Amino acid sequence: MKKISLLISSLALGSLMALPLSAQPLSSQQPPLTQPTQPNSPDYNPNAAYEGPYKLNTWSISIHGGPTQFFGDLREYDFKPVTENSSDSYSEWGTFQGGITLNKQLTYLFGLRADVTAGALRGMKRRLYSRYFRSSYTDFAVAATVNLKGLFFGGTKMKHWKIDGYVGAGQVWYNSTAYELGTGQTLRSTNGATNDWIIPLGMTFNYELSRRLDLGIDFRVNHVNSDIVDATFGGDFSRDPNDGTNINGFTTNRRGNSALDKYGYGAVMLTYKLGKNPLRVTKTDGKYEYTPEEGFYHLRYTDPKLLVKPPKILTLEEMDSVAKANRPPDIDPRLLLDTDGDGVSDFFDKEPNSPAGSVVDGSGRVIDFDRYVKDAIASGATCSEIFTNVMFDTDKSIIKPEYREMLTNVATLMNRSGCRLQLAGHADRRASDRYNMALSRRRVDAVRDFLVNEGGLQDASKIIVDYFGSFKPIADGTSRTGLQRNRRVELKLLP
């Protein structure tokens, strides 16, 4: 009994766990159906697949029929019919039931079923009671189911099998009469239909025959909250037909010294899966392949997680093909070159061979900076875009004398106009990246400090500072000349 109680508790807990999962697709956390989430998307939720764009069918209906068996006071617990004389035989076998079941799969592991069953029961007992009974019944029950195959074997094995355990609650209506063995005289009767609570406990084994039909067997035991299903309660040994013939109105509590009655059946079950455009997974080249875009699989047999296709791992040839297909057009190499080191790439440079240290405009044309400054100051015109470089010795950040006058004129122009100045420090590659970044910053700071402290720049906020170490060379770093051209601070006058 302890094992049965544990099983009932686990199944009941499973059914409660299933309910939030079934409601999950309807919550506000799921994407609206008008904006479907693709199975390969990182936002795809397998547990909600049967309510999403690749919806799975979840409803089915079954019919079942088979022999019944009673477990109570009037049972011999053997397989031999009792014969009182040559003409009377009282067998406990030979009664049948039939019914219909409506199934709803909430998740791959959990579901619900509602059953309506009608049938007959009979049994007998020679010792003590010397009586047999006949009964007809109808019951209705709702049960929570758990997919034992999926729980223990997962969704990738035994794909066309479904093994369920279930437990629930319901009502039974029965009409029973007990007779004396040999004479057939009525001893006890419920005198009409009597109803009691039942707890059904069982297992089903189903095989998926086709897209629509399943064939299986169902074993169930119904625990009745009564001990008068056989019109007999424990300790009632009287053979007097006038001693309590009518036992209608008995309470559902135990009246005698016997256990509560039970009855059950073993049945063949045929299931029809409801839903549109059903699918049944099949093997392709020895491997099961799911094609949800062609229809709807049934949640009875399909774990939604299996609909998520694994990402394709490209081969080297495929990656090379993708890279070639998405390769951007080649850029003009002149965009990356600055042959004369004036700060203007050769692609835009109108004079690509300007002398070292020349001051140029935005097109790379050499200009007389002193004349430009004097004209700009005299006319009051705003400055235009001009590029020039301040060069440095190896591992030095000291301004050379030949650049001091030019920097002073830049400061004067900035004081007289709305010009701004962008400074970018650089170094050659003969040191670590960290050291070169610090060195290029010291060179930028040296130019800025000269402009403010010695050049007389009144508003230091007009200077924009940046530094790049050796990451943006303008010349080949393998020659002495190239190294020299890379040790620089670029000045860019901006209107």
Image (tube, rainbow, N blue to C red):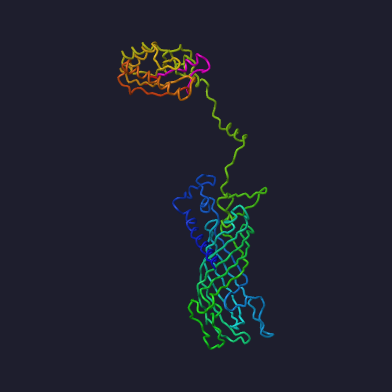
Q: Nearer the viewer, residue 93 or 174?
A: 93
The quadrant in which residue 121 appears is: bottom right
Q: Is residue 150 above or below residue 140?
A: above
Image: 471 above or below 47:
above
Q: Residue 355 at what x, y percent from top left? A: 46, 11
Q: Is residue 486 magenta?
A: yes
Quadrant (top left/top right/bottom left/bottom right) for the C terminus: top left
Q: Quadrant of the N terminus?
A: bottom right
Q: Quadrant of residue 395?
A: top left
Determine whether, in the image, residue 223 is placed left or right of residue 368: right
How far across and how far down the image is residue 362, in percent? 42, 18
Q: Is residue 400 left or right of residue 13?
A: left
Check the image and name the residue furthest to the right: 86
Across and down, in percent, residue 163 comes to 60, 60
Residue 170: image location, x then y, percent: 51, 69
Vertical order, 35 against 133 (above or below) = above
Q: Of residues 106 and 252, which is closer to you in this image?
A: 252
**Residue bounds of the magenta highlight:** 471-491
Q: How many numbered badges does the structure rendering display?
A: 0
| Rendered image quadrant of residue 405 | top left
Magenta-colored stretch includes residue 43:
no
Which residue corresponds to the image point at 49% horizontal and 55% vertical from the top-left? 21
Q: From the viewer's perspective, is residue 389 above or below residue 98? A: above
